[in-house]
Image (cartoon, rainbow, N blue to C red):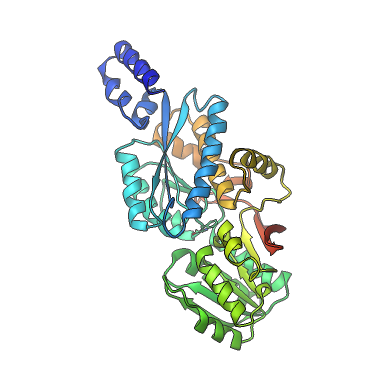
Amino acid sequence: MLARRTLICSSWALVVGLGLLAGCSKPAGGGAASAGGGETIAVGAFLSLTGSDSTFGIDTQQGIELATEQTNAAGGVKGKKIKIVAEDDKSSPQEASIKVKQLIDRDHVVAVLGEVASSRSLAGGQVANTSHVPMITPSSTNVTVTQGKDWVFRACFTDDMQGQQAAVFAVTGQHRTKLAILYAAQDAYSSGLAQTFRDEAKRLGATIVADKGYQKGETNFTTYLEQIKAAAPELVFVPNYYNDMVQVARQAKTLGMSGASFLGGDGWDSEDLLKGAAAELEGSFFTNHYAPDVPWPNSQRFVADYRAKFHREPSSLAAQGYDAAKLLYDAMTRAPDLKPESIKNAIASTKGFQGATGTLSIDANHNAQKPLVVVRITGGKFTYFSTAGG
Ligand code: PHE
């Protein structure tokens, strides 16, 4: 592959002159060469491949890999193959900024995919935006991630919609009117989702009988849970990530709280939640982008392809990674050329895109308008329960 690439590059250099040689010699399959006519197009990805949220990054990378493999097998984009340059941000916002800068300055990617956690998409998005390189986050839902950033998009719904739908599900759907909230106070995703849920639940006539924000890094939630239990809520909304939730669920069980009394958000989606606390969370619900048994044709095709390649069930992270990459390639195909500005405009005009996680359109605020799924934890599995919004 490398030898062939060098050969192509040298003959190009002979034909079109030395100007292209610099671009051709880029080891990462260079976006500079690609934008000008090289063999591959470099697309960057920054993900939590290690660190506290590693399942988010690994699952998303697999989704991106499947989408890229399928697109390349079908001829690529504008006759060129896509090459993903993936960087590990180690689950840290500081690293996320550094990696996005590297992808842009060193690898000359034409666009960036990532991150999952809103805190890291906020950090990386700042860099992409000031560098004028389009970025699509597959699954960061915090409202501020795309706000005021011309170059940043998302392939998912926002927490305005998710928090609102979670409240509608709890109050209108499940008839629970005495509610409690437990969330990670300094985390953009968790506190933002808690806020929308709180506002909408109150608007619907519910009472918040306990409202507790914990500090990032805390592992003992017993005191909060005791206070929540004492307030006797009918449902406890916990919009955190799976790693914290495993501890919350186990400690709640010790206090005699039932798994069915919990409701979560998309941050619960991880194999590790089931491995760590499936029994403790039996009967609980969470809002999500997708479920493996969701009855949508595009999802079923994706699930079959993913299973065949990776021999496991895809998480919603994998499905979102797949959709974000396919959405980008679709925009690149429609764009008149592969200049960042042209790709950005093509992403912005996406309408009725058929994703594995539903049909989506990009709105004026660069957010995806699409449905949301309620998932139930039963028998140690994530099971589709209902669809809302979109
Ligand atoms: N929505 C979460 C965030 O914005 C990330 C996430 C998406 C986590 C999907 C799990 C599943 O931080």
Is 122 situated left or right of 16 in this image? right
Up the image or down, 369 lies above or below 70; here it is: below
Residue lying at 39% horizontally and 18% vertically, measured from the top left: 4
The image quarter in which residue 42 lies: top left
Q: Nearer the viewer, residue 217 or 290?
A: 217
Q: Nearer the viewer, residue 201 or 45?
A: 45
Q: Nearer the viewer, residue 265 or 352?
A: 265
Up the image or down, 79 lies above or below 258; here it is: above
Q: Can residue 93 be seen from the camera position used here?
A: yes
Is 190 situated left or right of 208 in this image? left
Residue lying at 68% horizontally and 62% vertically, measured from the top left: 380
Residue 89: x percent and y percent?
Answer: 38, 51
Up the image or down, 202 lies above or below 69; here it is: below
Residue lying at 36% horizontally and 52% vertically, measured from the top left: 96
Q: Give the residue at the far bottom of this rendering.
A: 230
Query: What is the tally of numbered marks visible in this picture?
Result: 0
The image quarter in which residue 228 lies: bottom right
Q: Can residue 270 be seen from the camera position used here?
A: no
Is 296 situated left or right of 140 in this image? right
Residue 47: x percent and y percent?
Answer: 43, 49
Q: Quadrant of the N terminus?
A: top left
Residue 66: x percent and y percent?
Answer: 56, 38
Q: Give the residue at the far top of this rendering.
A: 15
Q: Nearer the viewer, residue 166 or 73?
A: 73
Residue 69: x percent and y percent?
Answer: 54, 32
